[in-house]
Amino acid sequence: MRRVAIFGSRKRINYTEEHWEILRKKRARAMEIMEKLRKFGIESIVYGSVARGDVNTKSDVDLFIPEVIPSYKVEIALDGFEVLEKRIVQATPTMQLKGSSY
């Protein structure tokens, strides 16, 4: 597994225009999903490679929902939303949901 950064290290990275275009598309996708959730009263926060900016063509969109809600509400909010895969992970009934969209 490739590490993105080692704690405390800094380096200058020059991204290509292709990389910026991938990042624009991934962030637009994240905003699209977040807006759909928001319409159902579900706030979310983007994290992972899209938030850091170190995306590639295979990067997924990671969203964190910082409140305890039933998973069916997320499913209803995203009904009709075209995604290749939806995963909802909930370790216990009192943990926050984690979803991935590809």
Image (tube, helix red, strand yellow):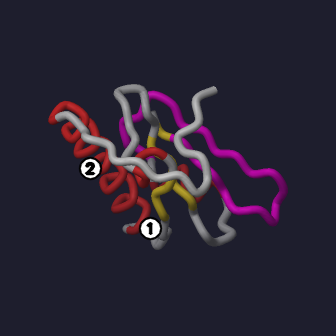
| Residue, disc 1 | 40
Task: Tell me where residue 41 appears, x and y as whole percent.
Answer: 46, 73
Distance of label 1 from label 2 (alpha carbons)? 19 Å
Q: Quadrant of the C terminus?
A: top left
Q: Residue at x 43, y 52 (%)?
A: 52
Principal secondary structure, stretch drawn in magenta? loop
Q: Secondary structure at mark 1?
A: loop
Sequence-wise, the earlier of marks 1 and 2 is 2
* Front residue of 33 and 71: 33
Q: What SS does tag 2 mark?
A: helix
Q: Are marks 1 and 2 in contact (CB under 8 Å)?
A: no
Magenta span of residues: 79-100
Question: Is residue 91 one of those drawn in magenta?
Answer: yes
Q: Whole-percent x and y of residue 12?
A: 34, 47
Q: Is residue 65 above or below residue 59?
A: below
Task: Inspect the image, locate mark 2, and give the three-letter code of the amino acid beneath it.
Answer: Ala
Provide the residue designation for mark 2: 28
Picture layout, residue 11 above or below residue 70: above
Q: Is residue 1 left or right of residue 48?
A: right
